[in-house]
Image: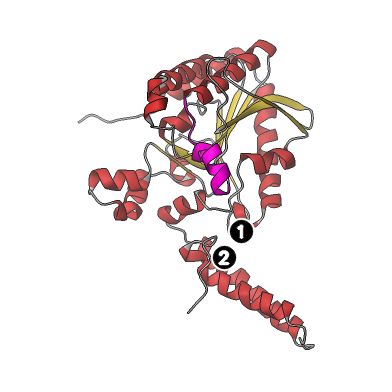
Amino acid sequence: MKEFNPNYLDFEQPLLEIEGKIKQIKNDPEKTAKADAKIAKLDKEHSQLTRKIFGNLTDWQISQLARHPLRPYTLDYIPNLFSSFTELHGDRMFGDDAALICGIGKIDEHIFMFIGHQKGRDAKEKVKRNFGMPKPEGYRKALRVMKLAEKFGLPVVTFIDTPGAYPGIDAESRNQSQAIAENLYVMSNLKVPVISIIIGEGGSGGALAIGISDKLGMLENSIYSVISPEGCASILWKDAKKAEQAADALCITAPKLVKFNLVDVIIPEPLGGAHRDHSAMTSSLKMNLISMLEELEDTDIGEILYKRKEKISSYGKFETS
């Protein structure tokens, strides 16, 4: 029976087999002089297979990559991407939502207010972070940080990675929809530059609540959708197993969203996805984020607001017959 590793997606399993052979040779205490040649051959096979697999991904496979269990999250990026970061807690009304990380960040000479979703790795942290699904107090914490940014004239940077806003009764009883709506309104008129980057999964209003921006970037293997492929399939075909068909129909991947002028920048990922090389992914993200910050910091705020409103107004094009 072939080894199955839950940290490898179905289409990544062939890579696991080659990696297992390489590891076995390296760990063999009686390895011969031919071992290095065998490893080099297997490395070449691994590289070729990786290029073949990841050069022909379907929209559903990209959706799976966006949720990969080893994909870097906000708290993986912060210590490696930011020169410094001071976290701010609480909405000053109800409590502190751990599903959203907020604070003051710095990259080189660029200082900004930061907001980012955090999903959590192990079971304990996933519960603490509510699987990256914020409640109203999370969005109100984000709103507090946005208003601080406007007060001190600092740009706002957001990292989006959520299945959506938490839909539970407790969140609804504390006016979840009102909290999201207020964020949309404030972000639309915020008198500072706003940059949003989808680092994984951008789901529905939960993503949009921190996603109204002047520059919207997407990591190469991330998704941005009004509903999950599984949810869409359940509604349209009464069968969640048709998620692959739904993913293709929804147009939720970066290249398709750029084509529709909904996304401004596609940020390249390392070969095989962000989870295979966190360091390379951080470097790519840093370069693109600095470029966006510099472009907006050199633009008059009046022009930024005008372009933001024009951008929002251009969404949802339709034709009449």
> Could you say which disc has been placed on residue 51 in the image?
2
Relative to the observer, which residue lies in front, 277 or 121? 121
Tell me which amino acid carries mark 2. Arg
Residue 287 image position (x, y, % from top left): 70, 40
Quarter of the rendering containing residue 46: bottom right
Residue depicted at x 67% and y 76%: 22
Asked whether, in this view, residue 292 is left or right of residue 239, the answer is right
State which region is magenta: 121-135
Kindly indicate whether the residue at mark 2 contacts the one at mark 1 (C-beta within 8 angstroms).
yes
Image position, residue 71 (x, y; %): 58, 50
Q: Main secondary structure of the magenta part?
A: helix
CA distance separating discs 1 and 2: 7 Å
Which quadrant of the view contains residue 300? top right
Could you say which disc has been placed on residue 315 in the image?
Answer: none
Residue furthest left as drawn: 321
For the C terminus, the image quarter is: top left
Residue 127 image point, x, y percent:
52, 40
Q: Foreground residue, 276 or 254?
A: 276
Q: Residues within 10 Å of mark 2 (few under 14, many from 20)?
A: few
Compared to residue 59, the image places residue 164 above or below, namely above
Q: Say what secondary structure mark 1 lies in.
A: loop
**Residue 107 in the image: above or below residue 247:** above
What residue type is disc 1 on? Leu
| Residue 158 percent across, percent down from the top left | 59, 30
92 in relation to 132, above or below: above
Viewer-nearest residue: 157 or 162: 162
Which residue carries the number 1 mark? 271
